Image (cartoon, grey):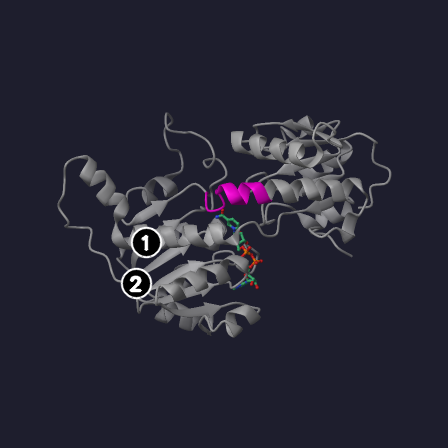
Amino acid sequence: MASTESPAIHSLAVFSTQPYDRQYLSAQLTTQFGDASPFKIDFYTVSLTPLTAKLAASHTAVCVFVNDILTAPVLQHLASLGVKAILLRCAGFNNVDLLAAKSLGFFVAHVPSYSPEAVAEFAVALIQTLNRNTHRAYNRVREGNFALHGLLGQTLHGKTVGVVGTGRIGLCFARIMRGFGCRVLAYDVYKSKDFETEKLGTYVELAQLLQESDVVSLHCPLLESTRHLVREETLAQMKDRALLVNTSRGGLIDTKAVIQALKAGKLRGLALDVYEAEAPLFYSDHSGEVMQDEVFARLMTFPNVIVCSHQGFFTEEALGEISAVTVGNMVEFMEGRGRVARNSLIKD
Ligand code: NAD
């Protein structure tokens, strides 16, 4: 929204703050403005929920991350407190009810791209770990066990890798896998010119990709149309003993169906950087607690499952870019550029 009516002094309430958020955002403000920052920031470690929304009072904008849930009631609460802008310090925006945000006149901006290579490289790291069992080897050697049984992998060169979603991250991922000497198959509802001109691989229908790929990596956004894209029927279409990797959004996979596929030996392995019920778990230390999530607990029993807590983005370069773009989004909001702002998610 055009924010000419906003108070002269702007302030930003940052939710789900981790130490690195504070470090990088503060450093970005100092780099850009020295001691004359045009807005002030308050950092809150709690996530944004119906209970914590009141902390946003007296702020003109909130800055949120992947597991802050901005439903219509939360947005209404924020609007009633005078908040006018939602700044996501991430690319995905499946956690914001954009229709409600639009009707309430919010300015909503995200960070569309921050080191897509960081996430693509992380997907490759997961594939390599899962395929060659380096996670198991690490533990064994530290315990004086130098046996190789159970560590057998496959040579990736010459294997077929399926990329679902050839946007910024999927494209980087396809380039890396090409470099490994893999045959790349891709599925996307919109074909990427770069993918075709760089001759990274071949676009096929999803069913063919699933039937032929030794490794399937998910890089499409979570939308109603992509929720549980991997489910019982699509798992059945997959090549036997394929590896499945998800660094995109947890909701793309029906976790219970994937557990059945792992039990049946249909999948050779599963690597997740994201999990459909990650919000109560990820980004905090629960090591002293009893795991309440039965599905997650079952996942942890498989030797061929790796789960990381949504860290694909987590590089120094990406944190720098996220902070720079987030501060830029705040400045665009303050300058009243509203829906013409570069990273606005609501454009008329
Ligand atoms: P992007 O928008 O550049 O690309 C997404 C691609 O998915 C587009 O080409 C789009 O056409 C395609 N797509 C849309 N619907 C599809 C469908 N039904 N089937 C197949 N493809 C479909 O996004 P990106 O920057 O490449 O990011 C991809 C996803 O990665 C994001 O949506 C986000 O959820 C996730 N992500 C994760 C991390 C992490 O830390 N693990 C970090 C950043 C982004």
Specify which label sits upstream in the sequence, 1 or 2.
1
- Residue located at (37% from left, 25% from top): 288
- The three-letter amino acid code for the residue at tag 1 is Gln
Residue 127: quarter of image: bottom left
Q: Residue reaching furthest right? A: 5
Q: Nearer the viewer, residue 220 or 235?
A: 220
**Which mark identifies residue 128?**
1
Q: Nearer the viewer, residue 269 or 132?
A: 132
Q: Can the viewer see residue 302 in this picture? A: no
- The three-letter amino acid code for the residue at tag 2 is Leu
Image vertical order of residue 286 relative to residue 337, above or below: above
Residue 13: quarter of image: top right
Residue 221: quarter of image: bottom right
Q: Is residue 52 left or right of residue 251?
A: right
Image vertical order of residue 322 relative to residue 82, above or below: below
The residue wearing badge 2 is: 156
Residue count near mark 1 (Cα–Cα under 10 Å), binned few <14, some 14–19, many ≥20: some
Could you tell me which secondary element the residue under label 2 belongs to? loop
Query: Which span of residues is magenta-colored?
Result: 311-321
Image location (x, y in percent) of residue 138: 24, 41
200 in magenta: no
Q: Is residue 75 left or right of residue 25?
A: right
